[in-house]
Image (cartoon, helix red, strand yellow):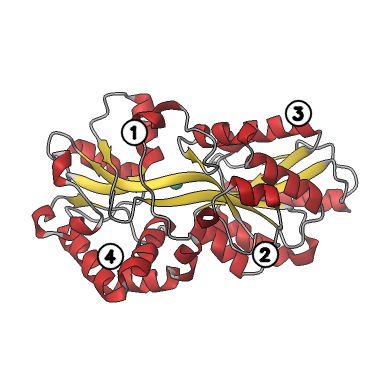
Amino acid sequence: MIRAILVSSVVLVLIACGGNGDSDRDVAGASDERAADRVVVYTSRQPHLIEPLFDRFTAETGIAVQFTSDNEASLIERLAAEGARTSADVFITVDAGNLWFAAERGLLAELDSPELESAIPASLRDEQGRWFGLSLRARTLMFHPDRVDAGELSTYEDLADPRWAGRLCLRTSRKVYNQSLVAIMIEAHGVERTEEIVRGWVSNLATNPFASDTQMIQAIAAGQCDVGIANTYYLGRLLADDPDYPVDLFWANQGQGGVHVNVSGAGLTRHAPRPDAGRALIEWLASDAAQGEFAERNLEFPANPAVPARGLVQDWGDFESDPTPLTVAGERQAEAVRLMDRVGYR
Ligand code: FE
């Protein structure tokens, strides 16, 4: 019976994902549903970023990892629909806004873990232990070095200045990344001031907002605009392919609140059939042993500050990050969406 449920869920996900590369992997020799020798993960991370870590976890602990990949919205709906019958122990996704939403929907358990509390800074995890950041991503300014002098750049807020008219590119406001950025700005400045800033961005746009950070960076490279805002790992991927890629990053708001950071992270599901195995996996992913590789595979930064960044992201140097608790990104998300709508940021 249990086997049948798992098999049917595999089929459903494969159909839902079409050809986009997501898939289910049954690594476990599934035995009893509650056996602690395996852990079931729902994840919106791309399999190639996370599967090698799961393999290491299995090698070190003997706990097999069975995972389902899909987009975060589908996984959240699936967890909600499955309720107490879910086979998922751990939910892994990106952006504190998504993690917050899953917690608000009552889908995540409160995990009381001294290991996680000491490994992950308080601003990068839920106060009630429902989710924990596992890697840190910075959303900062990107520019074309031939058309912008780094000395002209300072803050997100400054991109509202009329001197950037017709020179700014942005990703769509529909993506949670910009919703989280604006939510944190509302926390810092209030609605009125933030609305002025975002209105200024919209009036400075060189072209319609882009569907992805990558397209936005490519528009800067192509000369369609001079400056924009993106997560650093997207630039990292372009630089990994072409070390001379003609876009640079600038650490925003240094000495003025810090650069906007967000996380990918994980939580134990409320109805985890194997809570001990789920906890063991999350604690392992936050540990010194796993953090370097977890971040490096997506060109991110370790969430655990004791672990140094690896690879090409080291070239970007240290930066001051905004210490605002990331729960704010969730709490103010609806306000941020309404604000962006009001000023015509599509
Ligand atoms: Fe991303």
Which residue lies under the disc numbered 1? 316
CB of mark 3 near ligand 1 (< 8 Å)? no
Eye-nearest disc, 2 or 1: 1
Eye-nearest disc, 3 or 4: 3
Disc 3 residue type (three-letter):
Ala
Task: Point out residue 5 in the picture as x, y percentages from the top left corner.
Answer: 80, 53
Disc 3: CA contacts within 10 A as few (<14), some (14-19) or many (>=20): few
- Point out the tag, 2 or 1, that comes first from the N-terminus: 2
Disc 1: CA contacts within 10 A as few (<14), some (14-19) or many (>=20): few
Q: Gap between marks 1 and 3, in whole Å?
A: 33 Å
- Point out the tag, 3 or 4, that comes first from the N-terminus: 3
Counting labels gives 4
Task: Point out residue 239 in the picture as x, y percentages from the top left corner.
Answer: 34, 29
State the SS at label 2: loop
**Residue at point 48% right, 59% down?**
326
Which residue lies under the disc numbered 3? 59
Disc 2 residue type (three-letter):
Leu
314 over 208 or under it: above or below: above
- Point out the tag, 2 or 4, that comes first from the N-terminus: 2
**Residue 215 position by quadrant:** top left
Pointer 2 with pointer 4, Cβ within 8 A: no
Q: Which label belongs to residue 345?
A: 4
Which residue lies under the disc numbered 2? 107
